[in-house]
Image (cartoon, grey):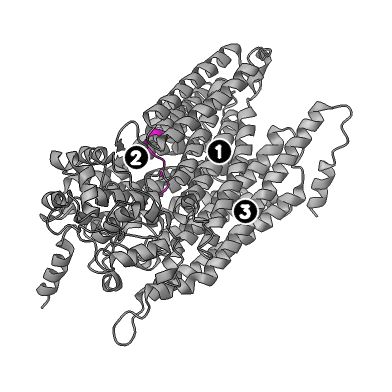
Amino acid sequence: MISELTRGERRLALAVLTAVATFGLALAIAGRGDILAVHGGLIMASAVILMFFVIAGFYAPEPGEERLAQYYDTPTKAGVVLAMIWGVIGMGVGDWVAWLLVYPDMTFDAAWASFGRLRPVHTSGVIFGFGGNALIATSFHVLQRTSRARLPDQFSPWFVLVGYNLFCLIAASGYLLGITQSKEYAEPEWYADLWLVVVWVVYFSIYLRTLMRRQEPHIYVANWYYMAFILVVAILHIVNNLAVPISFGSAKSYSAFSGVQDAMTQWWYGHNAVAFFLTAGFLGMMYYYLPKRAGRPVFSYRMSILGFWGITFMYMWAGSHHLHYTALPQWVQTLGMTFSIMLIVPSWMAAANALLTLNGAWHKVRDDATLRFMMLAAVFYGLSTFEGSFMSIRAVNSLSHYTDWTVGHVHAGALGWVALITFGSIYAVVPWVWKRPAMYSNKLVEVHFWLSLAGTLVYVFAMWNSGIIQGLMWRTYNEGGTLAYSFIDSLVAMRPYYIARAIGGLLFAIGAVVGLYNVWMTIREASAERADEPDAPVVPALARSLQAGE
Amino acid sequence: MFGIHQKLERNAIGFVVAIIVVSSIGGFMEIAPLFTIDETVEEAPDMRVYTPLELAGRNIYIREGCYACHSQMIRTLRDEVERYGPYSLAVESKYDHPMLWGSKRTGPDLARIGGKYSDAWHVAHLINPRDVVPESIMPAYRWLAETPLKVNDLSDHLAAQRVVGVPYTDEMIANATADAYGQAMPDGPFAAGVTARYGEATNVRAFDGKPERVSEMDALVAYLQVLGRLTDAAHQQTASTEGAKP
């Protein structure tokens, strides 16, 4: 990797790493009486380890000018592998906490192993670790192809990727140590938030600098979505994380807003993290890899325009549907509900655009599990956006809110849409950037597909059942006019569904392990071939791909 | 319209500006008025701030992720009011930085848990929930009773709270650590200061049953016992609406 950097970039890398290490040291010293010191040490250690790599490769020959004629894909490769590793970790922890709801004593009497600390490791692990790395990796890949321009330099993509993963590491380790802001999906504390802003500014600058040098006159629709993802996540992140640390030597901070204003800001953030992190970026993936894999042009240019601006405008109003019947003023609740219902239009426009693109290529959907991943993702996107609009209706929400139905809805989107489009895109991009004719094993892609589908269905059906039963039990009155069930009655009724959910999650997580293995073996094949090209055995990947289709 | 877009999508900066403008409208329209419209948060002159011990307990509640399974927001629905108590008012979380309304009830709502159970019940429940509620699936928090509470930085906590708008006085900030000791050690020298600063109704007890020291258990139970009891506004509101009915 270092050999791909110019001498100047290696010097820049060393300077940046020195600055980061110094920052870590400063945090460690300032926070010596606090758990902040652990994170200071972690930041410093990460920077120092990376410095060794840079120094070891410092005098390697510089890359030639011919590199400028090619796309720069090594950060994409690293990002894909990191996404798969985070995916396995995040989904594994998710399934573990699902089992904790069945066997609550599996916490070894350790603080870090309790549900409340592990749950954000799961949510951040899958959203930021798995989803974020996949977004960064694919965005670099898509940006270069659709602009017909190479990334502006070799250093900044690595800064974004490595810096972002440092953020993920600080976040996940912090939860285990008990460092959290308690804001859902924005749990990392002030210093991690500031660091993410730095990383994000560089990420955006890469996008802009590459677009400025594009050979294509038009900016492709996938890039609209990636840009909306980068820009709006920045706005959301900064506003929702406004906070005052108790001192520069403490990890703890207090949020700037309180009570009802804080609740509205948090769910404006929370719902648009879904919209712009978990939807916009992944729609970018869909708009590139799905037509590419299907070999068909996007069905409708106008639908992609209307869908994009509809999503960008309307989603930002929808967050207050998380707060129906609460102390939030009713006019805000009603506005949120109204826009949430209208959102079905641009959402289905995007889903329909994807599915109609497949017209003329449905035989490929049948034969190619990678394309089938993307097709199914679009179907789940349509289903879960419909469900979301439905659940935002005040009367429906009175039943569904606070129950497992919400959890089921989130996972219909997260497993069925986000993870499936990601796996599909990764299976499309891995052979592409490693210059292989196909994945190591198409059979394993097939296995992964069916594990994912089965896991998602089991999970979602379990949570529909548990959520609706729970909601109904809470509001059931007996003939005497008193509540029929105690809270604990409703909890006992959940047990079979919690077991089913944990099994569904397990199937899905096993699928991710299969995917990681398949990606790893594809990389190994690629490097084995490069190392020993003339003597390499005939790789039967092509033959396998033919068999898998039958 | 699509012709304009053809031009827009050829201009990177224009596109960036368009995304920022279009996406900013919704949040601005919904959030900004919440700070300016007076009726958003009710008046409650009796509303008090958290004591340092309760605030420390609240931070333990945050640290352990209790909010992932327990809400603190009773909705304006009949069954919720009958199950948990009067529905929550905005003023009740006016000093909550951040709010802990929650989004999921794997366990019951806690907005009005204060005073519902004894301290001893809470301690037993936190040490092993299944000792008092056999069907419970809550994790056990045994270590809280053995972990001494970190009290030396409580003044910093109160000072930061004041920066974000909670009306702690200089005296409260200066005495934060002493007040934490005082509230958990009813027979100690600092107990009188707590009621002087935070009101006669403040719970001053050995929450974990051990008056000789202040543990994280003390703090968390002190917090749980004050939930829903910082103001009477919610009870008054229910009483007055009931009285208004024909």
Of A321 and A366, nearer the camera is A321
Residue A252 bears which disc, if any? Answer: 2
Asked whether disc 2 touches disc 3, contact meaning CB atoms under 8 Å apart, the reply is: no
Callout 1, which amino acid?
Asn
Q: Nearer the viewer, mark 2 or mark 3?
A: 2
Chain letter for mark 3: A
Asked whether disc 1 touches disc 2, contact meaning CB atoms under 8 Å apart, the reply is: no
Q: Is residue A106 above or below residue A537?
A: below
Where is residue B128? Give x, y as percent: 43, 64
Separation of residues labelled 1 and 2 (CA atoms): 27 Å
Where is residue A201? Give x, y as percent: 43, 28
* Residue beneath disc 3: A509
Residue name at image x 68 percent, y 12 percent: A61
Callout 2, which amino acid?
Lys
Separation of residues labelled 2 and 3 (CA atoms): 33 Å
Of A203 and A241, nearer the camera is A241
Residue A545 bears which disc, if any? Answer: none
Instruction: Tell whether position A186 is magenta.
Output: yes
Q: Which corner quadrant holds the N terminus of chain B?
A: top left
Which range of residues does the magenta coloring cover? A184-191
Q: Nearer the viewer, mark 1 or mark 3?
A: 3
Of A143 and B62, nearer the camera is B62
Chain letter for mark 1: A
